[in-house]
Image (tube, helix red, strand yellow):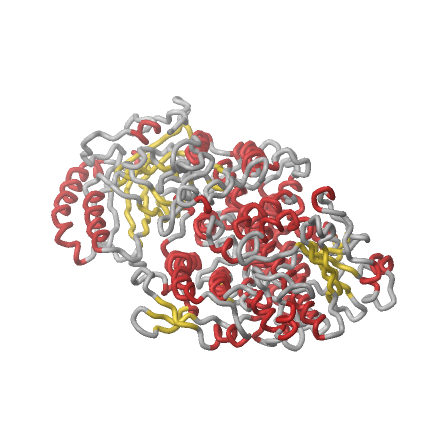
Amino acid sequence: MLRAKSIPNTSSGLSIPTVRRHLAASVTGKSSSKSTHLVPFYRVPQKQRGLVAAAKQVHVNIQENESVTSSSASKSDGIDVKVVITIRKKMKEKLSEKIEDQWESFIIGIGQGILIQLISQDIDPVTKSGKSIDSFVRGWMPKPSNHPNIVEYAANFTVPHDFGLPGAILITNFYGKEFFLREIIIHGFREGPVFFPGYTWIHSRNANPESRIIFKNDVYLPSQTPAGIKDLRREDLLSIRGNGKGERKPHERIYDYAPYNDLGAPDKSKDLGRPVIGDQERPYPRRCRTGRPSTKSDPLSESRIEKPHPVYVPRDETFEEIKQNTFSAGRLKALLHNLIPSIAASLSSTDIPFTCFTDIDKLYKDGFVLSNEEQEEGTGNLFLGKLMNQVLTVGERLLKYEIPDAIKRDRFAWLRDNEFARQAMAGVNPVNIELLKEFPILSKLDPAVYGPAESAITREIIEEELHGMSIEEAIEKKKLFLLDYHDMLLPFMEKMNSLPGRKAYASRTIFFYNHTGHLRPIVIELLLPPTSTAPQNKRVFTHGNDATSHWIWKQAKAHVCSNDAGIHQLVNHWLRTHACMEPYIIATHRQLSSLHPIYKLLHPHMRYTLEINALARQSLINGGGIIEASFSPGKYAMELSSAGYSKWQFDMEALPADLIRRGMAVEDSSNPNGIKLVIEDYPYAADGLLIWSAIKELVESYVQYYYTEVNSVTSDIELQAWWSEIKNKGHFDKRNETWWPSLNTKEDLCGILTIMIWIASGQHAAINFGQYPFGGYVPNRPTLLRKFIPQETDPDYEKFIHDPQQSFLSSLPTQLQATKVMAVQDTLSTHSPDEEYLGQIHELQGHWICDNEVVKLYKEFSAKLEEIEEIIKKRNKDNSLKNRCGAGIPPYELLRPSSGPGVTGRGIPNSISI
């Protein structure tokens, strides 16, 4: 509802609030502006000629009636301007939609479709209110279009000489359905064309009687807003926030917060009930509120919308049609709605383990026949690319996977210790390895519950692998590193191991960085909660010198990889990028006007994230979803993710700060970014710091350009409300933490923005697009294991001794589990043909940037990224960098800025869009 001050209409006397609500019950088509000569441009399809013929006479009559007004208006009466409105039609229309388009043309033609109102930046000195002038768009004239889906309408106005430049446009859609407004351009002012970027859906007045406010492509801090549009700036933000009540409707563009209380389906099955994630017991970032009714079984849980029906996201957050057709999200929807059910239908009756490595190889060489009975006819498969690459017979397709990078160059690399260690720094999850700073290793868990705090890894075990070096010396020289999943996982072990077909340990792995510059694992500790018979339920493994020890060591590494896969997916990927970005996006829309420079800076890095997150809540992280079915934590997956959030800190999400916290870098003012890597051959960190630095430079230059005054940050009321809301609403469960950065200076602002853009772009790319290249070969990175490591007292120990390969394979995910997760990983690792990469200016952003100095900043940023691309190429050919170059070693390209389409293992998109 409009709350802005009334701005009288200079031609009709209607205030803006009245104009936004007022229309006579019967619209005559007469304009209230001084000049009502309206000439929409429209390509009339041949099939529409019959229908529109009747409307042509109406158009002629309108023009005749208006000709007197037009001819009598002399140049001294005002300035003649033309408003060109560009609307984008659907690329693929059904017959019924084409008929609706014909009717839409008729309605607009007789002046009952679109009302536009120009709002001046200036206020009337007498009334102290903004100046305005309005008119219906009506009449049409066929005009060739450069694009078959683009429709242009032109409205001619005569505005008073003292009207000033328009700063906003109110647009009211009287037609029965929404339309997509691409842009509005006003020609005729002495200063040149005035551009109003749209790229937004304009709702029908039937759905919401309020007009939409479209601002000019100017940039203003709140205090700089022209007087004529100040109230509209506030009004637009109020309309976006909503009132926090009721169920959201598809046409709405309301952003609000809610906890993750929509993951379970207790009304469907008691087994599908899930606790609320996002409360005092299970803290979590907030998601976008949908407002659906509570379930009958659990008043705290929100009822679900099941596929293929979409979950609400604000209207402009949904994928554009071109994205639906070619974007990876279309592929993901096809996967979730069609392929995964078909895999389950084809394999569920024979859900067996892999019996030999040849069974796994067949997924890439031969594929397997997939029943197509449950798929919707004509949908889904076109998105799945090479996965579904051959039609066998009617109702059957061949599912065949590409050979992943993990084994493409060296099919046995995954067996070796140096590859196991290499992937801790150059794999898909290079963000958990840390420097071992003290010994013995101690847990922070309650010893009364989880047993003695001290690790079972002894000095003697470690020093056997140090070639004469003591532990103290190795720690001092920064030679020992740790992958520690003990405290995160041990509290979940009883729950996880109670699930059918799941067997897991908490784990610690110690690595030694030797004199040749190689990192290798030297000891693994696997732990279970203490019991009365095993008060210290801890086992320690080394690589050993005999065949039995080697096979046991391989299984121990597999358990570490399984833990790593779960922490990667649930904490580092989903939580720290997808889930933590969502509150930033919601707050940006709620508190920063589209006129705000920080809104324009962040917008490319927010596109489509809410939509992809909603899809994940519906089918990936939900109760009974793919993540629960495919990863060790099972139904406790999101509770584990919440445990990860308990340790999350916003300020530690800065790459340099994270590296220092983990001991992987030390402060060094002589180096760029003020740090020096402990291991220079750490590909994720080395390349990541280049990207981080480039983002930081852009942000600092951008902020310096717009915030020129000393107190301009503290006096920016929108910016301060934005940061307050992120802390107190978006991350409500962390609102009282003392580590939140202040927002008092330009330096504070630059630090906050650099973190957000890094998370949305570089960080997400580094931990997402390698999922299939590294996880597509199940033995390299199993997402769950189904057996404990055999001990001599176990009944199956003799089977292990007799056939250790079969023992290993039988502990891996089943063929159904593996195939499902491989399909998801393949899709999540895929770039679409029209991906928007870091450094590339999206068309909408290009329309927003109206300042040559800002254009120059973005060009410099793009040039910097091109330089980084070349640096990374050279690094990947440097034989001294063993973690990214060598026989069978895949180059590290996850942070190369550009990429082609498909599963490439490289490329940094602007935003989290898959």
The answer to which of 604 and 155 lies nearer the viewer is: 604
- Answer whether residue 775 is visible to the viewer in this image: yes
Q: Residue at x 73, y 42 (%)?
A: 448
Which corner quadrant of the image does residue 464 belong to? bottom right
Q: Residue at x 47, y 45 (%)?
A: 263
The answer to which of 579 and 873 lies nearer the viewer is: 579
Residue 850 in percent (x, y) is at: 48, 47
Q: Is residue 108 left or right of residue 646?
A: left
Q: Is residue 474 above or below residue 117?
A: below
Q: Is residue 725 left or right of residue 104?
A: right
The quarter in which the N terminus is drawn is top left
Q: How many numbered circles are shown?
A: 0
Residue 78 in percent (x, y) is at: 32, 35
Q: Is residue 899 above or below residue 356?
A: above
Q: Residue furthest top?
A: 126
Residue 791 in percent (x, y) is at: 68, 64
Which corner quadrant of the image does residue 890 belong to? bottom right
